[in-house]
Amino acid sequence: MPSLTRAEAQRRSSLLTVHSYDVDLDLSGDGEVYRSVTTVHFAAAEPGSRTFLDVKARDLHSVRLNGRELDHTGWADGRLPLTGLAADNRLEVVADMRYSREGEGLHRYTDPADGLTYLYAFVYADHAPRVFACFDQPDLKAPYRFTVTTPADWTVLGTSPATQIAPGRWRLAESAPQATYLTTIVAGPYRSFTTEHDGIPLGVHCRASLAGKLAPHTTEIFDVTARCLDEYRDTFGARYPFDAFHQVFVPEFSVLSLDHPGCVLLRELYLDPATESERETRAVVLAHGISLMWLAALVTHRWWDEFWLSQAFADYMAHRVTAKVTRFSGPPVTFSVRRKAQAYVADQRPSTHPVGVEGDDVQSVLLEMDRITYFKGHSVLRQLVARVGEDGLREGLRIYFTRHRYGTATYDDFLEALAEAIGEDLSGWGREWFGRAGVNTLEPELEIAGGRIVSAAVRQSEPSRTHTLNVGLYGDTIKVERMTVRGGRTEMTGLVGAPAPDLLVVNDGDHTYAKIRFDPRSRAALPSWLPRLSAQNRAMIWCAVLLAVQDGEFPAPAYLSMVGDLVRAEPEPTILAEVLEQTRNDVLDRFLTPSRRPAAMAGLAAALDERLASAGTAISLVRARIDAEQDTATLRGWLDGDKLPGAVGLDDDLGWRLRYRLAVLGGLSAAEIADAVLVNPGLDADQWAAKCRAARPDPVTKAEVWRTIMTDPEISSYQLWALAEGFWQPEQNDLTDGYVDRFFAEIPAAAARRGDLVTELLLRFLYPRYAAQPRTLLLAQHLLGGSELPPPLRRAVADHTDDLRRVVRARQLG
């Protein structure tokens, strides 16, 4: 189907004013489709003109414009031509829409635990026409009135309050003006928990079989929600702008969360987190969704190339506000060691792009909505706050929301509001940071004589930017100095004459976005000084060292030696959890040469045993210990009831992790996997079972799993990703070697069966990431050079190939 272009959207926006939508959905049947009846009232600036309506139906039954039946034989590729428009128009469209299993449109899920069915509408970014006929672009905002027919025992939620007017018949109040992509409908026998805060009705909902898991968490969820609502009200200078606020944990959700006015959809992953760091992550995700009630719903981007601003700012505000007003103080630290590292990786790939993306059609813009958008955008906004100050940020945001309330705005509008607040022109700064791709490297140069600094400078790689940052000196005395870095080399004159430090940290406190390097003296001092630094600096430095490993500038064995020290001494749970995960996924499984892996795994296991024996029951340590175990008898003993390291109890999560590790090592049968699902039908048992099945080192099973991934059109996206995630294992390179060639031969046809989002996530897991050899790179280049690939697939293959090339290069260092 053609993707809406900016020019088409501008023409349609200049012609039309949409007054309202009335949408009637009949969700009471159990077939493949549902009836959707849409009535749109709109004005046309030029009577007699023509335009088009977006409708992606299975069957289009009737179209009536101003009382006359339209011939809809011209309906094609999701577009319905409309001709002979009047000044004021009433359009009615009757269609049958198809339920989705890939999370695009109205997704339907039947819970295997009890046979109950659940629905939710995923219409971001251009999937609203899969649910109702509409003019699908963000600047044509309008009020909505939904009416929904369901089985009598269902609940219905949406972007405005829903009332059951008869058994199985629901009517939603007229909404505030909103963009098509911000609509949703949730329907099913959801279990609801409700309260009220500051006059705002609050609800948290999940499927019935998971209500027991959600119930103990509702107090914390409501507390985080209330605190964030208050803080955003005070920061933005505007009260929460909608009638109620619901948060719904929905099954088989393709993204982490999706934010609609008054109704946020969340992945069930966050329903019952096991660790404190996972609860912190949930709080940040909740804060992100709440902030978008202002940043996207109250004021909406005019075109998709400015969608990045609301998402980046929401990510920044979520981490900031969670740390400020909830019991979780660590989000900025977690961001530095986790998300920011992901931004740096993305910003060095072939697909790198400016934070402020450009694109002439919806799909080309959405292709750029990635870790650069969210996490580099977040980082650049943190640098912006370092420039304008806290007061400037607050005043600028209040100007912005007052000026554009319930309307649309642009990036220029946002930057102008901040500039007005501080009395400075920020356009040049914005072009430098939001308009340029790539990441700088900042490296100190020191000359020391007689125990004191004789000269000091920071060297910056291209493309150079202006950085407002701190430089920290750590030795017999500690000094932190604020400075501005410009151009290729900036003298640090304020440090001349200071006592020579053991360690000099550029970007102390992590206020800017740049790869950080260390002078030789500081690099030698890192292992001894790292435990004594602030949590924020420790997180920033772990990120910097991991990037140096990936760049081939820091040997993987030296990194692993530092990890051993971290395991024994790191007090911050989130740093410990994130570094352990990166150590396993990036360093042990990829950047370390395979011949060194068994000994490195044993060394990590020994360090973890030492920490667990002395420090108790940190779940992240136990998980890492399971992942590091190479003996099936030990794993089997833990699963069968022998005391786990750290004296923790064996819950569902740890049980599945043990089974998965056993499956990888060939110690788990297919029958045991099936029995485990029957005995423990938990939150994500089906996904764990799929991963375990795919991970078994059995040629017949591998062939069956491969065939399912590549050819089964009925499998859900969650099952697809789980199978792909389990398929490749570093312990099984010989077994799966033949599938490397097959991946590059078969992936174009497999991707053609899936949506863009599903394909992107599929490639993240299914690309042969452990086959770090020149042959794999040649196969990738052949695919990229000789095929007409869809842009999402080409981008994903090119990026993952670049990642693999880094692994090949870094292994040469050792």
Image (tube, helix red, strand yellow):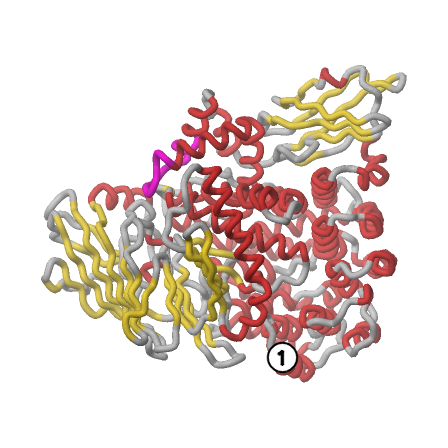
Can residue 406 be found in the magenta stretch? yes
Picture coordinates of residue 541 (x, y %)? 73, 39
Number of numbered discs overlaid on the protein picture: 1
Residue 300 position within the rendered picture, expressed as x and y whole percent measured from the top left: 37, 44
Percent from the top left, x then y, of residue 33? Answer: 33, 74
**Image quadrant of residue 452?**
top right
- Front-lying residue, 772 or 439: 439
Left or right of 477: which side holds 275? Answer: left
Q: Residue at x 11, y 46 (%)?
A: 47
Is residue 557 located in the magenta-colored stretch of the structure?
no
Q: Is residue 118 left or right of residue 44?
A: right
Which contiguous range is marked in magenta? 402-415
Amino acid marked by disc 1: Val
Dot 1 corresponds to which residue? 677
Q: Is residue 356 visible?
A: yes
Q: Is residue 510 above or below residue 757?
A: above
- Tell whether 263 sits left or right of 784: left
Residue 138 place in picture, x, y as percent: 34, 47
How many other residues sit within 10 Å of disc 1, few (<14), some (14-19) or many (≥20)? some
- In the rendered image, the residue lying farthest to the right is 450
Q: Nearer the viewer, residue 702 or 509?
A: 509
At 55% from the left and 40% from the top, the residue drawn is 378
In the rendered view, tell whether residue 226 sits above or below residue 675: above
Is residue 352 in view from this perspective? no
Residue at image x 54%, y 79%?
Answer: 113
Classify residue 333 by image quadrant: top right
Secondary structure under the numbered disc 1 in the rendered image: helix
- The residue under the point 64% across, 60% down is 768
